[in-house]
Image (cartoon, rainbow, N blue to C red):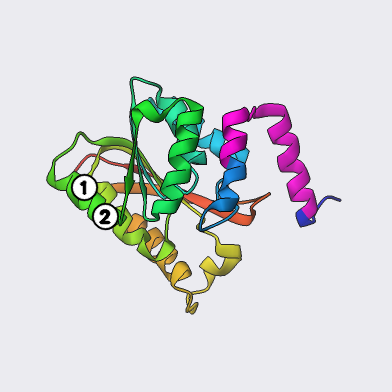
Amino acid sequence: MYSSKASWRDVDDYFVGTLVAEDEALQGARSSGAKTSMPQAEVAANQGKLLYLIAKMTGARRVLEFGTLAGYSTIWLARAVGPSGHVTTLEADAGNGAIAQINLEAAGVAGWVDLVIGAASEATTTLIREQVEPFDLFFIDADKPSNPEYLRASLELARPGSIIIGDNVVRDGEVADPASADDRVTGVRTFLEAIADHPRLEGTAIQTVGTKGWDGFAIAVVLDPQ
Protein backbone atom coordinates (compact mmCIF):
# COMPACT_ATOMS: atom_id res chain seq x y z
CA MET A 1 0.00 0.00 0.00
CA TYR A 2 1.34 3.41 -0.97
CA SER A 3 1.32 5.66 2.08
CA SER A 4 4.76 7.24 2.62
CA LYS A 5 5.83 10.78 1.80
CA ALA A 6 8.11 9.32 -0.86
CA SER A 7 5.04 7.79 -2.46
CA TRP A 8 3.23 11.14 -2.36
CA ARG A 9 6.14 12.51 -4.38
CA ASP A 10 5.98 9.57 -6.79
CA VAL A 11 2.30 10.24 -7.48
CA ASP A 12 2.94 13.94 -8.06
CA ASP A 13 5.79 13.05 -10.40
CA TYR A 14 3.44 10.76 -12.33
CA PHE A 15 0.71 13.42 -12.56
CA VAL A 16 3.21 16.05 -13.68
CA GLY A 17 4.83 13.73 -16.19
CA THR A 18 1.45 12.77 -17.63
CA LEU A 19 -0.55 16.00 -17.49
CA VAL A 20 1.76 18.97 -16.91
CA ALA A 21 4.34 20.16 -19.40
CA GLU A 22 6.95 22.40 -17.77
CA ASP A 23 8.79 24.18 -20.54
CA GLU A 24 12.26 25.70 -20.23
CA ALA A 25 10.94 28.97 -18.80
CA LEU A 26 9.01 27.26 -16.02
CA GLN A 27 11.90 24.95 -15.25
CA GLY A 28 14.19 27.95 -15.06
CA ALA A 29 11.85 29.77 -12.71
CA ARG A 30 11.64 26.73 -10.46
CA SER A 31 15.43 26.28 -10.41
CA SER A 32 16.04 29.95 -9.64
CA GLY A 33 13.75 29.67 -6.64
CA ALA A 34 16.80 28.34 -4.81
CA LYS A 35 18.27 31.85 -4.99
CA THR A 36 15.29 33.54 -3.33
CA SER A 37 14.70 34.28 0.34
CA MET A 38 12.46 31.17 0.54
CA PRO A 39 14.07 28.36 -1.47
CA GLN A 40 11.71 25.68 -2.82
CA ALA A 41 8.64 27.57 -1.61
CA GLU A 42 7.02 27.86 -5.05
CA VAL A 43 3.92 25.81 -5.80
CA ALA A 44 4.31 22.32 -7.24
CA ALA A 45 3.99 21.99 -11.02
CA ASN A 46 0.56 20.36 -10.88
CA GLN A 47 -0.60 23.08 -8.47
CA GLY A 48 0.68 25.72 -10.87
CA LYS A 49 -1.34 24.05 -13.61
CA LEU A 50 -4.37 24.09 -11.29
CA LEU A 51 -4.04 27.87 -10.88
CA TYR A 52 -3.79 28.15 -14.65
CA LEU A 53 -6.93 26.06 -15.14
CA ILE A 54 -8.94 27.95 -12.51
CA ALA A 55 -8.05 31.21 -14.23
CA LYS A 56 -9.03 29.71 -17.59
CA MET A 57 -12.27 28.15 -16.33
CA THR A 58 -13.43 31.36 -14.66
CA GLY A 59 -12.46 33.55 -17.59
CA ALA A 60 -10.20 35.67 -15.40
CA ARG A 61 -8.62 38.63 -17.17
CA ARG A 62 -7.18 40.49 -14.17
CA VAL A 63 -5.21 38.70 -11.44
CA LEU A 64 -3.68 39.98 -8.20
CA GLU A 65 -0.98 37.79 -6.65
CA PHE A 66 0.40 38.25 -3.13
CA GLY A 67 3.95 36.85 -3.06
CA THR A 68 6.01 36.53 -6.24
CA LEU A 69 9.29 34.87 -5.17
CA ALA A 70 10.92 33.74 -8.44
CA GLY A 71 7.74 34.22 -10.45
CA TYR A 72 6.88 30.56 -10.99
CA SER A 73 3.16 30.80 -10.20
CA THR A 74 3.11 34.25 -11.82
CA ILE A 75 4.09 32.70 -15.15
CA TRP A 76 1.27 30.16 -14.92
CA LEU A 77 -1.26 32.91 -14.12
CA ALA A 78 0.06 35.24 -16.84
CA ARG A 79 -0.15 32.50 -19.44
CA ALA A 80 -3.73 31.81 -18.39
CA VAL A 81 -4.92 35.40 -18.90
CA GLY A 82 -2.80 35.95 -22.02
CA PRO A 83 -1.62 39.24 -23.56
CA SER A 84 -5.12 40.72 -23.40
CA GLY A 85 -5.17 40.19 -19.64
CA HIS A 86 -3.11 41.57 -16.78
CA VAL A 87 -1.38 40.20 -13.67
CA THR A 88 -0.27 42.39 -10.77
CA THR A 89 2.12 40.54 -8.48
CA LEU A 90 3.33 41.90 -5.13
CA GLU A 91 6.75 41.03 -3.72
CA ALA A 92 8.26 42.48 -0.55
CA ASP A 93 11.87 41.46 -1.27
CA ALA A 94 13.70 43.38 -4.01
CA GLY A 95 16.16 40.53 -4.55
CA ASN A 96 13.33 38.10 -5.18
CA GLY A 97 11.75 40.63 -7.51
CA ALA A 98 14.92 40.93 -9.59
CA ILE A 99 15.00 37.16 -10.06
CA ALA A 100 11.31 37.08 -10.92
CA GLN A 101 11.64 39.83 -13.51
CA ILE A 102 14.29 37.83 -15.37
CA ASN A 103 12.05 34.77 -15.32
CA LEU A 104 8.98 36.70 -16.50
CA GLU A 105 10.95 38.07 -19.43
CA ALA A 106 12.32 34.63 -20.28
CA ALA A 107 8.75 33.27 -20.29
CA GLY A 108 7.61 36.05 -22.62
CA VAL A 109 4.90 37.32 -20.25
CA ALA A 110 6.55 40.42 -18.76
CA GLY A 111 4.55 42.67 -21.08
CA TRP A 112 1.31 42.04 -19.19
CA VAL A 113 2.69 41.54 -15.66
CA ASP A 114 3.14 44.43 -13.24
CA LEU A 115 5.71 43.40 -10.62
CA VAL A 116 5.39 45.68 -7.59
CA ILE A 117 8.21 45.67 -5.03
CA GLY A 118 7.40 46.65 -1.45
CA ALA A 119 4.96 45.91 1.33
CA ALA A 120 1.75 44.41 -0.01
CA SER A 121 -0.27 46.49 2.45
CA GLU A 122 1.08 49.68 0.88
CA ALA A 123 0.62 48.40 -2.66
CA THR A 124 -2.99 47.39 -2.09
CA THR A 125 -3.74 50.68 -0.32
CA THR A 126 -2.55 52.45 -3.46
CA LEU A 127 -4.64 50.21 -5.72
CA ILE A 128 -7.73 50.85 -3.59
CA ARG A 129 -7.12 54.59 -3.50
CA GLU A 130 -6.69 54.68 -7.28
CA GLN A 131 -9.96 52.74 -7.69
CA VAL A 132 -8.45 50.34 -10.20
CA GLU A 133 -10.61 48.00 -12.20
CA PRO A 134 -11.64 45.03 -10.00
CA PHE A 135 -9.59 41.85 -10.14
CA ASP A 136 -11.16 38.56 -11.17
CA LEU A 137 -8.77 36.23 -9.33
CA PHE A 138 -6.60 36.61 -6.24
CA PHE A 139 -3.79 34.27 -5.23
CA ILE A 140 -2.60 34.83 -1.65
CA ASP A 141 0.74 33.13 -1.13
CA ALA A 142 2.82 35.46 1.03
CA ASP A 143 3.52 35.85 4.76
CA LYS A 144 0.78 33.92 6.55
CA PRO A 145 0.36 36.24 9.57
CA SER A 146 -0.83 38.92 7.13
CA ASN A 147 -3.40 36.68 5.41
CA PRO A 148 -6.37 38.37 7.13
CA GLU A 149 -5.12 41.77 5.97
CA TYR A 150 -4.64 40.47 2.43
CA LEU A 151 -8.16 39.07 2.47
CA ARG A 152 -9.60 42.44 3.51
CA ALA A 153 -7.68 44.18 0.74
CA SER A 154 -8.80 41.59 -1.81
CA LEU A 155 -12.44 42.22 -0.94
CA GLU A 156 -11.91 45.94 -1.55
CA LEU A 157 -10.49 45.13 -4.98
CA ALA A 158 -12.94 42.39 -5.97
CA ARG A 159 -16.27 42.19 -7.78
CA PRO A 160 -19.11 39.70 -7.36
CA GLY A 161 -17.84 36.44 -8.82
CA SER A 162 -14.16 37.10 -8.09
CA ILE A 163 -12.22 34.09 -6.79
CA ILE A 164 -9.83 34.24 -3.82
CA ILE A 165 -7.32 31.42 -3.31
CA GLY A 166 -5.18 31.17 -0.18
CA ASP A 167 -2.23 28.76 -0.27
CA ASN A 168 -0.48 26.79 2.51
CA VAL A 169 -3.43 26.61 4.89
CA VAL A 170 -2.75 23.20 6.49
CA ARG A 171 0.65 23.87 8.09
CA ASP A 172 1.38 20.13 8.48
CA GLY A 173 -1.91 19.77 10.35
CA GLU A 174 -1.23 22.52 12.89
CA VAL A 175 -4.13 24.57 11.52
CA ALA A 176 -6.45 22.31 13.52
CA ASP A 177 -4.76 23.31 16.81
CA PRO A 178 -6.54 26.31 18.36
CA ALA A 179 -3.78 26.59 20.99
CA SER A 180 -0.96 27.01 18.46
CA ALA A 181 1.37 29.91 19.23
CA ASP A 182 2.78 29.94 15.69
CA ASP A 183 1.75 33.25 14.11
CA ARG A 184 1.63 31.57 10.69
CA VAL A 185 -0.97 29.16 12.01
CA THR A 186 -2.98 31.84 13.80
CA GLY A 187 -2.85 33.97 10.65
CA VAL A 188 -4.27 31.11 8.60
CA ARG A 189 -6.95 30.32 11.19
CA THR A 190 -8.04 33.96 11.32
CA PHE A 191 -8.08 34.04 7.52
CA LEU A 192 -10.30 30.94 7.32
CA GLU A 193 -12.62 32.19 10.05
CA ALA A 194 -12.93 35.53 8.24
CA ILE A 195 -14.02 33.70 5.09
CA ALA A 196 -16.58 31.74 7.08
CA ASP A 197 -17.97 34.82 8.83
CA HIS A 198 -18.03 37.29 5.94
CA PRO A 199 -21.48 37.74 4.36
CA ARG A 200 -19.93 38.30 0.91
CA LEU A 201 -17.79 35.18 0.88
CA GLU A 202 -18.51 31.50 0.39
CA GLY A 203 -15.58 29.11 0.55
CA THR A 204 -13.97 25.84 1.48
CA ALA A 205 -10.51 24.42 2.11
CA ILE A 206 -8.81 21.28 0.78
CA GLN A 207 -5.83 19.43 2.25
CA THR A 208 -3.30 17.93 -0.12
CA VAL A 209 -0.25 15.68 -0.08
CA GLY A 210 2.55 15.58 -2.64
CA THR A 211 5.97 17.01 -3.37
CA LYS A 212 5.17 19.89 -1.00
CA GLY A 213 4.35 17.51 1.83
CA TRP A 214 1.09 17.80 3.78
CA ASP A 215 -0.54 21.08 2.91
CA GLY A 216 -3.60 22.52 1.19
CA PHE A 217 -5.42 25.61 0.00
CA ALA A 218 -8.59 27.59 0.60
CA ILE A 219 -10.83 28.92 -2.15
CA ALA A 220 -13.69 31.38 -1.90
CA VAL A 221 -16.03 33.24 -4.22
CA VAL A 222 -17.16 36.83 -3.68
CA LEU A 223 -20.94 37.09 -3.58
CA ASP A 224 -23.28 39.91 -4.54
CA PRO A 225 -23.85 42.38 -1.70
CA GLN A 226 -26.98 41.63 0.27
| Amino acid type of the residue that numbered disc 1 sits on in the rendered structure | Glu
- Based on the picture, tell me whether residue 213 belongs to the magenta stretch: no
Tell me, yes or no, whether the two marked residues, 2 and 1, touch with CB atoms within 8 Å: yes
Residue 203, image x and y in percent?
40, 48
| Amino acid type of the residue that numbered disc 2 sits on in the rendered structure | Arg
How far is disc 2 from disc 1 in space, using C-alphas? 7 Å
Residue 212 seen by the camera: yes
| Identity of the residue drawn at 40% across and 28% down | 58
Residue tagged 2: 152
Residue tagged 1: 156
Range of residues picked out in magenta: 6-29
Q: Secondary structure at mark 2?
A: helix
- Between 217 and 128, the residue placed more toward the observer is 128
| Identity of the residue drawn at 74% across and 39% down | 13
- Based on the picture, tell me whether residue 25 belongs to the magenta stretch: yes
| Identity of the residue drawn at 23% across and 39% down | 224
Left or right relative to 188: residue 41? right
97 vs 182: above or below: above
Residue 115, image x and y in percent?
35, 41
- Between 67 and 70, the residue placed more toward the observer is 70
Quarter of the view holding residue 145 = bottom left
Q: Secondary structure at mark 1?
A: helix
Left or right relative to 171: residue 144? left
- Between 213 and 73, the residue placed more toward the observer is 73
**Among all residues in the image, which is located at the extreme right?**
1
